[in-house]
Image (tube, rainbow, N blue to C red):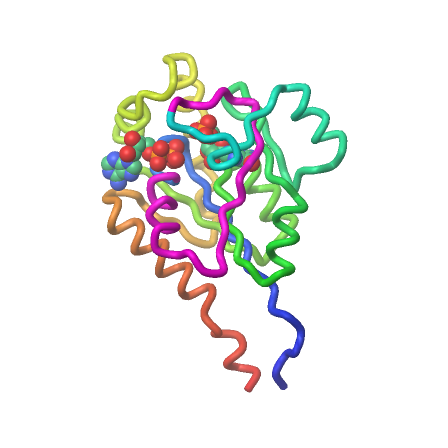
């Protein structure tokens, strides 16, 4: 029998080390996917980079504002990473999912773990670098972090890579176009009517 209730959106968790190319691949993804899917804009205490726009890349807030949001239970998950706080707005995600819109979270691995525990059916995707050397090359080549921040981000990589088998999908970002095609294939498969077809 067909389910008459409104279909829930799907929750995608995209994670992986800083500098692996998550943002680059997701930008490409959102250029090509405009219907029924949205990006969850996180709150952070990190200072904006010159090209970043408040409300688009992040909601940039003070430590006090972030701590107030934690107290008010506004986050689905939050984590401290590389000396700053990052958090996902709970109401935004629930509202979208309840309206049948697919939601993409781009978050680091501690947050990803929490979301995967809360939402066992979420679709978790880990982007891995072709090598640690290439990751460092990309992180430095981006020219967005000072040396201390680069070191903190590189120090986190071993721990981040150790849980790679916990994610539903692993994508090695060797070449942008190929990695994007893999993400698109995962998205298309996971949002296809594969389950509904069995209900007919
Ligand atoms: P993240 O969002 O994971 O921190 P970014 O998307 O900011 O990573 O990418 C880090 C840097 O690496 C950027 O300068 C980006 O242009 C570059 N980059 C991303 N993917 C690739 C790739 N497949 N090959 C070479 N450089 C890449
Ligand atoms: P950056 O400072 O490079 O923008 O982000 C650092 C890391 O924090 C990245 O891995 C990014 O995906 C992650 N991040 C961004 N928003 C969130 C969030 O809301 N929660 C968590 N846990 N991590 C986030």
Q: Which is nearer the eye, 85 or 114?
A: 85
Residue 45 coordinates in the image, percent (x, y) = 56, 23
Split into 4 quadrants, where in the image is the N terminus? bottom right
When the figure is inspected, residue 141 is found, relative to residue 16, above or below; the finding is above
When the figure is inspected, residue 121 is found, relative to residue 173, above or below; the finding is below
> In the figure, is residue 158 to the left or right of 41?
left
Write the residue at 25% across / 42% down.
Answer: 174
Q: Which residues are magenta?
A: 23-50
For the question of whether residue 20 can be seen, the reply is: no
> In the figure, is residue 158 to the left or right of 174?
right
Residue 188 coordinates in the image, percent (x, y) = 40, 64
When the figure is inspected, residue 76 is found, relative to residue 53, above or below; the finding is below
Residue 100 coordinates in the image, percent (x, y) = 58, 63
Residue 114, picture quadrant: top right
For the question of whether residue 11 can be seen, the reply is: yes
* Total residue callouts: 0
> In the figure, is residue 186 to the left or right of 115?
left
Residue at the right extreme, as displayed: 72
Find out whether residue 164 is within the magenta segment. no
Find out whether residue 29 is within the magenta segment. yes
Write the residue at 50% across / 51% down.
Answer: 38
Location of ligand 1 given as a quarter of the image: top left
Residue 172 coordinates in the image, percent (x, y) = 31, 45
Write the residue at 52% across / 57% down.
Answer: 102
Split into 4 quadrants, where in the image is the C terminus? bottom right
Write the residue at 44% across / 19% down.
Answer: 152
Residue 151, picture quadrant: top left
């Amino acid at each position: 029998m067909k389910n008459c209730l409104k279909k829930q959106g799907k929750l995608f968790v995209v994670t992986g080390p800083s500098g692996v190319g998550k943002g680059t691949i997701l930008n490409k993804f959102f250029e090509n996917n405009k219907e029924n899917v949205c990006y969850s804009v996180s709150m952070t205490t990190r200072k904006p980079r010159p090209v970043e726009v408040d409300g688009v890349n992040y909601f940039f807030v003070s430590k006090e504002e972030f701590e107030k949001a934690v107290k008010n239970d506004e986050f689905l998950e939050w984590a401290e990473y590389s000396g700053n706080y990052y958090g996902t707005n709970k109401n935004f995600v629930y509202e979208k999912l309840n309206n049948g819109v697919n939601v993409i979270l781009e978050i680091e691995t501690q947050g990803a773990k929490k979301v995967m525990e809360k939402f066992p059916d979420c679709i978790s995707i880990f982007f891995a670098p072709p090598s640690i050397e290439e990751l460092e090359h990309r992180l430095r080549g981006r020219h967005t972090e000072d040396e201390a921040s680069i070191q903190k981000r590189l120090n986190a990589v071993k721990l981040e890579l150790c849980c790679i088998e916990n994610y539903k999908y692993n994508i090695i970002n060797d070449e942008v176009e190929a990695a994007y095609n893999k993400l698109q294939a995962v998205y298309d498969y996971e949002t296809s009517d594969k389950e509904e077809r069995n209900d007919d």
